[in-house]
Image (tube, rainbow, N blue to C red):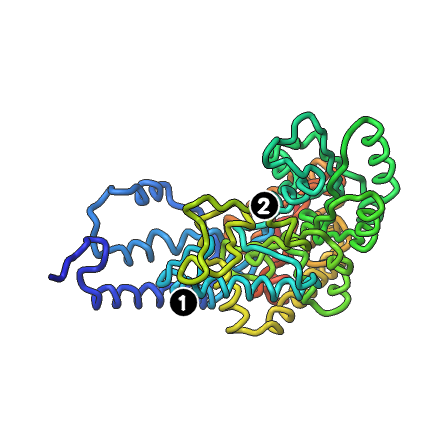
């Protein structure tokens, strides 16, 4: 008897035609990304999305083309430089289809996806200069990676933490001023508390080592237990890099776990000189958090945490109740399982996006794209400096350019103008800048992790900024 479950297509040939139509629409979206900037959603879009508002029918593909594809987040467009959002790749379409067809739970056991994730971890480990003894796991992004790394760091100093809790011990952590909020949130989630994060002032764009030493001494004298030092490989506001070799020396000197927030900036490791050298010393960290969905361009979501000592990594999360016992053979074989290295037991195959991208385009294509993004940021800075009323907020270090549109105005008016320009250019589809504060002034900010950006996009966007200046 041919039993129908009701959740498989009744006619696979009809479904095949629908799927081909969807694939064509997705390819059109990517191929014509330059013609499809962000646009405000219509007022009735939420009503269109309500579940069950209309009967289930075969018009789903038409609805996706009219109600879904036009109202994307904007980051596919070549002039999208707001925040730090990757563009996505054509290889993601292939990866998504394969992942959907296999539907693997990447928590563990013995199947191909596990081996694929290990291959992606191994490739990343080598790029970051970590030893073969290091471990890693694909996660939603740097926010989750940071929690995992900090938990491992905490267990180094509190061996019985998982059984007894932190108790009255006051741990303190140290990071440069302007560290990403992922660090703050991780300390809050772990119960350490953001009040126990010391944000150390910068000197020449890097964490001030002398102030760090003074702060450590004061905290120890006050009864705290310093345990963690965080370094920036690409700060969120300005794209700044700490001297990671210096931080590694400080971590050794003061017995601190060194974590590097490399959400996007770790990937300068693939770039040409001089940008390649920005991450010198990253190989000495105890842990690194990074994202593939930012400066490796793959679709959301895919991040990774790398931890130098696999034993410390596993000790922070491993748990095998009876229903998760492994076997020597069969599906429950194949140690280790990824559920022993992170928060999730049920996990999708994120690694397949990275694997497909590297296998389709090759590593050199990514190195070239990252290098070119740095060149585009430098070009934007050069163009800004040529315009009489514009002024850089900070010298460009990597791929982030901040500037004010008219420095002849008082600071408050500059802030108002820059915010207005950012909004206007977003709404008219010309370009997407975000904003940040530099020396108290709201400035336009371009974080270029967009493989579609060309020099012509840079010049056109700055022309549009100039046209909006009074």
Of mark 1 and mark 2, the one earlier in the sequence is 1
Which residue is tagged 2? 143
Residue 241, compared with residue 360, is above or below; it is: above
Q: Is residue 81 visible?
A: no
| Residue at screen point 57% across, 58% down | 292
- Residue 139 is situated, as x and y percent measured from the top left of the image, at 53, 52
Name the quadrant containing residue 358.
bottom right
Which sits in the foreground, 110 or 95?
110
**Relative to 303, 378 lies left or right:** right
**Residue sticking out furthest to the front:** 328
Front-most of 201 and 450? 201
Q: Is residue 146 visible?
A: yes
Locate the N terminus by quadrant. Answer: bottom left
Check disc 1: other Cα within 10 Å, few if <14, some if 14-19, many if 20+. some
**The quarter of the displayed image where residue 371 is located:** bottom right
State how far apart marks 1 and 2 are (Cα): 30 Å
Which residue is found at the position 68% from the left and 45% from the top? 443
User: The residue tagged with tag 1: helix, strand or loop?
Assistant: helix
Q: Position of residue 52 (x, y in %)?
A: 25, 42
Q: Of 441 and 90, which appears nearest the observer?
A: 90
- Counting from the top left corner in percent of width and height, residue 127 is at 67, 65
Give the vertical position of 113 relative to 338 (above or below).
below
Q: Secondary structure at mark 2?
A: helix
Residue that carries the numbered disc 1 in the rendered image = 27
Q: Is residue 113 left or right of residue 393?
A: left
Q: Residue at x 51, y 61 (%)?
A: 351
Label 1 with label 2: CB-CB less than 8 Å: no
Q: Position of residue 128 (x, y in %)?
A: 68, 62
* Residue 458 versus residue 339 in the image, above or below: below
């Amino acid at each position: 008897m041919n039993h129908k479950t009701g959740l498989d297509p009744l006619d696979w040939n009809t479904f095949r035609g629908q799927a081909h139509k969807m694939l064509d629409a997705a390819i059109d979206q990517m191929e014509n990304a330059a013609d499809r900037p962000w646009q405000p959603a219509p007022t009735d879009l939420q009503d269109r999305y309500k579940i069950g508002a209309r009967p289930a029918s075969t018009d789903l593909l038409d609805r996706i083309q009219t109600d879904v594809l036009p109202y994307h987040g904007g980051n596919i467009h070549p002039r999208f430089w707001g925040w730090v959002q990757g563009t996505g790749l054509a290889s993601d379409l292939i990866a998504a289809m394969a992942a959907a067809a296999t539907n693997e739970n990447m928590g563990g056991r013995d199947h191909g996806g596990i081996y694929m994730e290990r291959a992606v971890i191994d490739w990343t480990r080598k790029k970051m200069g970590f030893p073969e003894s290091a471990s890693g796991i694909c996660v939603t992004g740097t926010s989750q990676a940071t929690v995992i790394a900090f938990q491992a760091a905490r267990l180094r100093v509190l061996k019985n933490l998982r059984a007894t809790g932190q108790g009255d011990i006051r741990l303190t952590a140290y990071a440069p001023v302007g560290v990403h909020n992922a660090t703050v949130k991780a300390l809050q989630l772990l119960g350490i508390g953001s009040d126990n994060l010391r944000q150390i002032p910068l000197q020449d764009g890097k964490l001030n080592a002398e102030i760090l030493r003074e702060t450590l001494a004061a905290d120890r004298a006050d009864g705290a237990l310093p345990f963690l030092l965080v370094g920036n490989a690409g700060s969120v506001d300005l794209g700044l890099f700490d001297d990671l070799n210096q931080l590694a020396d400080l971590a050794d000197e003061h017995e601190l776990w060194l974590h590097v927030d490399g959400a996007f900036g770790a990937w300068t490791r693939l770039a040409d000189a001089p940008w390649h050298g920005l991450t010198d010393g990253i190989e000495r960290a105890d842990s690194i958090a990074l994202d593939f969905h930012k400066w490796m361009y793959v679709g959301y979501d895919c991040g990774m945490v790398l931890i130098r000592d696999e034993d410390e990594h596993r000790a922070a999360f491993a748990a095998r109740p009876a229903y998760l016992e492994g076997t020597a053979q069969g599906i429950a074989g194949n140690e280790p399982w990824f559920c022993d290295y992170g928060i999730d037991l049920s996990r999708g195959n994120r690694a397949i996006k990275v694997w497909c991208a590297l296998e389709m385009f090759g590593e050199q294509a990514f190195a070239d794209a990252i290098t070119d993004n740095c060149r585009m940021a430098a070009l934007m800075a050069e163009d800004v400096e040529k315009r009489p009323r514009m002024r850089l907020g900070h010298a460009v270090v990597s791929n982030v350019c901040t500037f004010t549109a008219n420095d002849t105005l008082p600071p408050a008016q500059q802030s108002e103008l820059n915010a207005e320009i950012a909004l206007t250019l977003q709404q008219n589809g010309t370009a997407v800048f975000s904003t940040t504060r530099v020396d108290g002034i709201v400035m336009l900010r371009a974080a270029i992790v967009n493989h579609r950006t060309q020099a012509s996009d840079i010049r056109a966007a700055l022309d549009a900024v100039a046209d909006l200046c009074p």
